[in-house]
């Protein structure tokens, strides 16, 4: 299918998304409540998987507590979807009111000292809004801001999200082109600050490191650490907490000033520990609908 035909077919959907993005936040969350009920209780979108993931991760909790996590997850899930659509028409000032970044000076210090930075992120809170980091970080023209992503199979949605992620002037780098892009960013004294969402189930081509995570043996992507090691880059973690609907606090936590000086898997282990602490603090904020333990869960 050509891009022209695809754009024509998806034009009605594009119109609906743009209209939704113009809704005030209050109305957006009324819509989110409706969608959350439909997704969780009517359509039951991946409900069995969500319940299985939560049960395996929190065996110490009662069934009632786990069901509460599941219900809140669906509301957060639809909140994040609509908040992401809101990027089509949101103003910088609105994002500044709703996002709080703490510890950005750690990133600025590393780049000022000539080092690039890998920002370990996760599918927690609104991960798409993390791209607004550029509103708080250094504006040095020698620093390029970016995030690594896996292209979607649907070309229209892939382009839609690609454009959204550039809203705050950071570039989206496809996973298979990350090494080339980061090497280019370092030319002529340049540095990169690049976000890596590294909590997904690794693909067959990813390096693997197995960690006990949320009571389960879990394969983690080790390729992020290997890449940062080659670049002698620093590593930090984005510790996200939802402080209200559409409001997030992101604390930048240090992992390593120079990954090349760390022991093998030390950085990946630190990321997993940070992430588990984030999830345990606010269990409903993670993306439980992701088939994270496909090869290990319920054997």
Image (cartoon, rainbow, N blue to C red):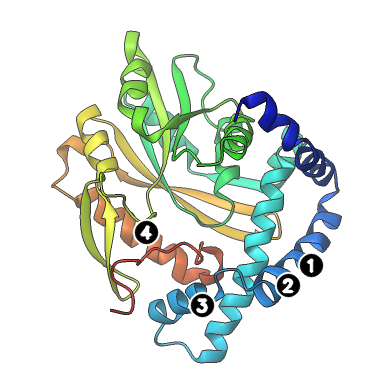
The location of residue 294, given as percent across then percent down, is 35, 66
The residue shown at (47%, 38%) is: 151
Q: CA distance from mark 1 to mark 3?
A: 20 Å
- Dot 2 corresponds to which residue? 37
Above-or-below relation of 213 to 226: below
| Distance CA(mark 4)–CA(mark 3) | 27 Å
Residue 298, percent from left and from top: 33, 79
Q: CA distance from mark 1 to mark 4?
A: 33 Å
Q: Quadrant of residue 206?
A: top left
Mark 2 → mark 1, Cα distance in angstroms: 5 Å
Disc 2 vs disc 1: Cβ atoms closer than 8 Å? yes
Decide which of 46, 196 is in the foreground and name it: 46
Q: CA distance from mark 2 to mark 3?
A: 15 Å
Marks 4 and 2, the one that precedes in the sequence: 2
Residue that label 1 marks: 34
Residue in the foreground of this view, choosing between 89 and 139: 89
Q: According to the image, label 3 marks what residue?
A: 48
As displayed, is residue 43 above or below residue 265?
Answer: below
Q: Which residue is mark 4?
A: 274
- Residue lying at the far left in this picture: please name it: 263
Badge 3 marks a residue whose secondary structure is helix
Please tell me which residue is depicted at 32% across the width and 59% down the height of the picture. 272
User: In whole angstroms, how far apart are the C-alphas of marks 4 and 2?
Assistant: 31 Å
């Amino acid at each position: 299918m050509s891009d022209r035909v695809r754009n024509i077919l998806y034009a009605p959907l594009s119109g609906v998304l743009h209209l939704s993005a113009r809704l005030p936040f209050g109305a957006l969350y009324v819509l989110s409540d409706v969608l959350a009920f439909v997704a969780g209780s009517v359509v039951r979108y991946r409900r069995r998987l969500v319940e299985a993931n939560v049960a395996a991760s929190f065996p110490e909790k009662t069934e009632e507590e786990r069901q509460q996590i599941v219900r809140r997850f669906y509301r957060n899930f639809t909140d994040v979807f609509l908040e992401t659509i809101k990027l089509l028409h949101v103003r910088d000032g609105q994002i500044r009111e709703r996002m709080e970044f703490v510890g950005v000076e750690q990133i600025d210090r590393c780049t000022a000292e000539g080092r690039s930075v890998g920002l370990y992120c996760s599918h927690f809170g609104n991960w798409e809004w993390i791209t607004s980091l550029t509103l708080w970080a250094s504006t040095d023209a020698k620093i390029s801001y970016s995030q690594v992503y896996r292209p979607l199979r649907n070309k229209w949605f892939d382009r839609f999200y690609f454009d959204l992620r550039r809203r705050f002037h950071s570039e989206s780098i496809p996973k298979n082109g990350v090494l080339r892009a980061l090497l280019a960013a370092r030319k002529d004294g340049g540095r990169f600050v690049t976000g890596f969402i590294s909590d997904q189930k690794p693909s067959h081509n990813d390096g693997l490191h197995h960690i006990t995570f949320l009571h389960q043996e879990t394969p983690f992507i080790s390729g992020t650490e290997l890449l940062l090691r080659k670049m002698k880059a620093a590593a930090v973690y984005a510790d996200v907490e939802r402080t209200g609907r559409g409001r997030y606090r992101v604390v930048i936590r240090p992992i390593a000033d120079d990954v090349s000086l760390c022991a093998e898997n030390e950085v990946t282990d630190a990321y997993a520990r940070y992430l588990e602490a984030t999830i345990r603090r606010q269990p409903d904020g993670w993306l439980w609908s992701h088939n994270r333990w496909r090869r290990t869960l319920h054997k």
